[in-house]
Image (tube, rainbow, N blue to C red):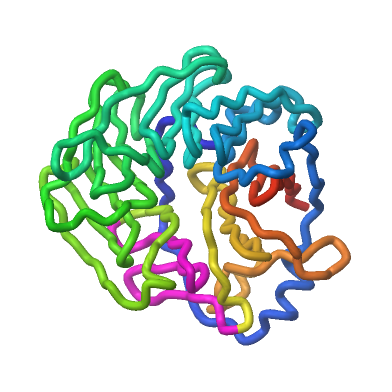
């Protein structure tokens, strides 16, 4: 469940390699889950984003302006799709009525739960209309950031009424995929060419890290940032957890693409989702010496989850939802 305030975790995280993956999976990370059904014909639509504002009220969106709303924890859904929005990349609601959509056609705002939308101007690195917006975050009720195509990094200081570009390098015009700020001034944006841009002055200046590399794996899909040196990444190479001392990456057996990350808030659970993959931080295992706290989730029968997920979001500390291709919606329950 993502409100508009930043998600800042206290303390350092311990990351290390693990040689007992299969044992850990079976013992520590089995979850109960439900496969939910959207209205008829929604199974042809790719769902890219999910956002719950309470334990029962949530939204999912994706291709061709597809948008579905639930008020009963996913048991039933109301269609509010609008093809003119284009592909919905990111939904961020601050209440059951007020929210934002980052889409292939730009940034939009609703005040009636997605029944109608108003476009909001954002800009690319040339100062032109930015086009696709892939991710956004409100750090406070007034300060927020939105990123997307053409080197688009935009900031608002008036609750989203107006946005201004804070991208200072017109030679860096790749698509940014995700943004994560831990205060109004300190944050990171990531995207194509494995880009990782850091600022501690609200975007006035940036420390830039990027790498062209193999086009097949040069995009960072998502980030959760705790501080300058401690963060999580979702990448085509898998899940990565970093701190100032060490890092953890999945081994070759479980190194498939991870597309999305989600957290229930400060000190709460964290998950990563991807191709036939759900990864969770498991506190019981993190307390077992120097081994990694990150484990792969199995289905209730012990089998590997055979589904692909593009995004996830927590409805409360014990329940999260994950979405994917062909109208896929799962509800997971922590045990």
For image coordinates 73% across by 72% down, the residue present is: 25
Q: Which residues are magenta?
A: 228-252
Q: How many marks?
A: 0
- Above or below, 277 relative to 190: below
- In reply to whether residue 275 is colored magenta, the answer given is no
In the displayed structure image, the side of residue 125 where residue 269 appears, left or right: right
Q: Quadrant of residue 207?
A: bottom left
Could you tell me residue 13's position as x and y percent?
45, 64
Q: Quadrant of residue 318?
A: top right
Q: Where does the N terminus fall, quadrant-wise?
A: top right
Could you tell me residue 234's position as x and y percent?
47, 62
- Between 307 and 55, which is closer to the camera in this rendering? 307
- In reply to whether residue 244 is colored magenta, the answer given is yes
- Between 168 and 318, which is closer to the camera in this rendering? 168
For image coordinates 27% across by 26% down, the residue present is: 121
| Residue at the bottom extreme of this rendering | 19
For image coordinates 88% across by 65% down, the residue present is: 301
| Residue at the top extreme of this rendering | 112
For image coordinates 59% across by 47% down, the residue present is: 312
């Amino acid at each position: 469940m993502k409100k508009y305030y930043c998600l800042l975790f206290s303390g350092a995280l311990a990351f290390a390699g693990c040689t007992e993956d299969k044992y850990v999976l079976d013992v520590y990370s089995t979850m109960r889950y439900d496969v939910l059904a959207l209205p008829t014909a929604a199974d042809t639509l790719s769902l890219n984003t999910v956002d719950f504002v309470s334990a029962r009220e949530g939204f999912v969106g994706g291709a061709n302006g597809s948008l579905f709303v639930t008020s009963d924890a996913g048991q039933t859904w109301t269609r509010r799709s609008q093809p003119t929005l284009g592909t919905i990349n990111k939904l961020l609601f601050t209440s059951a009525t007020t929210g934002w959509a980052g889409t292939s056609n730009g940034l939009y705002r609703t005040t009636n739960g997605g029944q109608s939308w108003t476009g909001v101007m954002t800009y690319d690195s040339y100062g032109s209309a930015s086009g696709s917006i892939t991710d956004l975050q409100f750090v406070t009720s007034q300060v927020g950031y939105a990123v997307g195509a053409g080197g688009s990094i935009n900031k608002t200081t008036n609750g989203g009424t107006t946005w201004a570009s804070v991208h200072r390098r017109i030679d860096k015009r790749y698509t940014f995929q995700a943004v994560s700020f831990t205060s109004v001034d300190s944050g990171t944006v990531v995207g194509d060419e494995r880009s990782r841009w850091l600022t501690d002055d609200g975007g006035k200046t940036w420390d830039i890290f990027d790498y062209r590399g193999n086009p097949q794996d040069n995009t960072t899909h998502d980030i959760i940032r705790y501080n300058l040196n401690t963060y999580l990444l979702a990448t085509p190479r898998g899940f990565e957890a970093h701190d100032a001392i060490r890092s953890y990456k999945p081994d070759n057996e479980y190194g498939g693409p991870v597309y999305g990350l989600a957290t229930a808030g400060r000190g709460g659970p964290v998950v990563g989702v991807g191709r036939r993959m759900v990864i969770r931080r498991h506190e019981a295992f993190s307390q077992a010496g120097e081994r990694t706290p990150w484990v792969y989730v199995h289905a209730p029968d012990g089998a590997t989850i055979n589904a692909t997920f593009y995004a996830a979001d927590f409805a409360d500390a014990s329940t999260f939802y994950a979405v994917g291709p062909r109208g896929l919606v799962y509800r997971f329950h922590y045990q």
